[in-house]
């Protein structure tokens, strides 16, 4: 199925975001984990979302409307980037939290984890915060082209256990496109997509 992605909004500050009833799924994860690359991979476009090897590339909340599907994918700035100034981290923390809290249409958050790195404190905090808010989590392992199947399976198990066995993470790579179809299926399902 061919999908179109339409960048409908970019918000740098809280005043640029309004709560929405429209179905949304957001992408969260530490800086550099591959959120923007995943959007580009799903869209089949190279530079729809800004990507960089320097952590902290995405500095705004970006809303992409998906058709067919009738929902919005939201690319968030990364969390847990230690080299940012405290003021900047606080500002983005507030922006992300405001977005995640203030949205009746938010159906789920895809939490991305680098397959090579064991879940970090900031990941665990994000997951427990989302659970506390009652927001469904869609776990995704990124950069799976970097490790072999055995390592993928080990990280999958580790993370599934951390989530209390609730969901098995999807192994994904925006380089090899591994997991692209599985991710579409999961996103559509979480968003309650209308594909007809
Ligand atoms: P922030 O916007 O800073 O939060 O980062 P991000 O999570 O959006 O990461 P981004 O997509 O900008 O990717 C960060 C780096 O990882 C870039 O150098 C990408 O090329 C690389 N990268 C992303 N996904 C993959 C992947 O699946 N495989 C490999 N090998 N590299 C990847
Ligand atoms: Mg980004």
Image (cartoon, grey):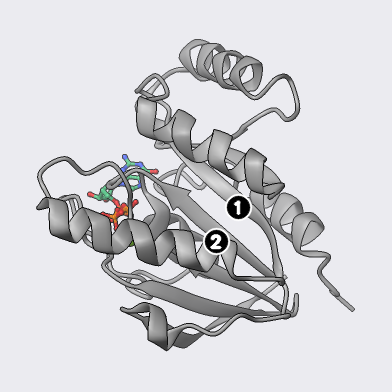
User: Split into 4 quadrants, where in the image is the C terminus?
Assistant: bottom right
Disc 2 CB within 8 Å of nearest ligand 1 atom: no
- Give me the residue at 58% from left, 49% from top: 110
User: Split into 4 quadrants, where in the image is the N terminus?
Assistant: bottom right
Q: Which secondary structure, mark 2?
A: helix
Q: Determine whether, in the image, residue 78 is placed left or right of residue 55.
A: right
Where does ligand 2 appear, by image quarter?
bottom left
Q: Determine whether, in the image, residue 23 is placed left or right of residue 57.
A: right
- Give the CA distance from mark 1 to mark 2: 9 Å
Depth check: give the residue in front, 117 or 120.
120
- Give me the residue at 57% from left, 15% from top: 153
Depth check: give the residue in front, 160 or 133.
133
N-term-proximal mark, 1 vs 2 = 2
Image quadrant in which you'd find residue 42 = bottom right
Q: Answer whether labels 1 and 2 touch (C-beta < 8 Å).
A: yes
Q: Which secondary structure, mark 1?
A: strand
Q: Is residue 7 above or below residue 195?
A: below
Q: Which mark is residue 141?
A: none
Residue 77 screen position, x and y as percent: 34, 60
Residue 122 screen position, x and y as percent: 37, 34
Q: Is residue 119 above or below residue 173?
A: above
Q: What residue does disc 1 label?
A: 109
Q: Answer few, some or many: residues within 10 Å of disc 1's Cα (few below 14, many 20 plus, some between 14 and 19).
A: many
Disc 1 CB within 8 Å of nearest ligand 1 atom: no
Q: Is residue 103 above or below residue 8?
A: above
Q: What residue does disc 2 label?
A: 100
Residue 175 screen position, x and y as percent: 39, 47
Instruction: In the displayed orientation, state which residue is furthest to the right.
Output: 196
Q: Is residue 187 visible?
A: yes
Q: Is residue 138 visible?
A: no
């Amino acid at each position: 199925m061919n999908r179109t992605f339409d960048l409908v909004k970019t918000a740098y500050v809280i005043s640029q975001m309004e709560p929405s009833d429209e179905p949304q799924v957001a992408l969260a994860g530490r800086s550099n984990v591959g959120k923007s690359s995943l959007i580009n991979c799903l869209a089949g476009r190279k530079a729809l979302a800004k990507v960089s090897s320097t952590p902290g590339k995405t500095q705004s909340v970006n809303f992409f409307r998906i058709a067919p599907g009738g929902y919005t994918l939201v690319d968030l700035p990364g969390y847990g980037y230690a080299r940012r100034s405290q003021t900047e981290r606080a500002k983005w923390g507030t922006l992300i939290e405001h977005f995640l809290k203030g949205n009746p249409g938010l159906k789920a958050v895809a939490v991305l984890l680098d397959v090579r790195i064991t879940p970090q404190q900031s990941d665990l905090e994000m997951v427990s915060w989302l659970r506390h808010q009652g927001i469904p989590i869609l776990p995704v392992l990124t950069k799976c082209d970097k490790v072999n199947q055995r390592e993928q399976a080990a990280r999958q198990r580790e993370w599934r256990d951390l989530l209390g066995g609730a969901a098995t993470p999807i192994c994904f790579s925006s380089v090899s496109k591994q997991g692209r179809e599985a991710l579409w299926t999961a996103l559509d399902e979480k968003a309650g997509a209308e594909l007809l």
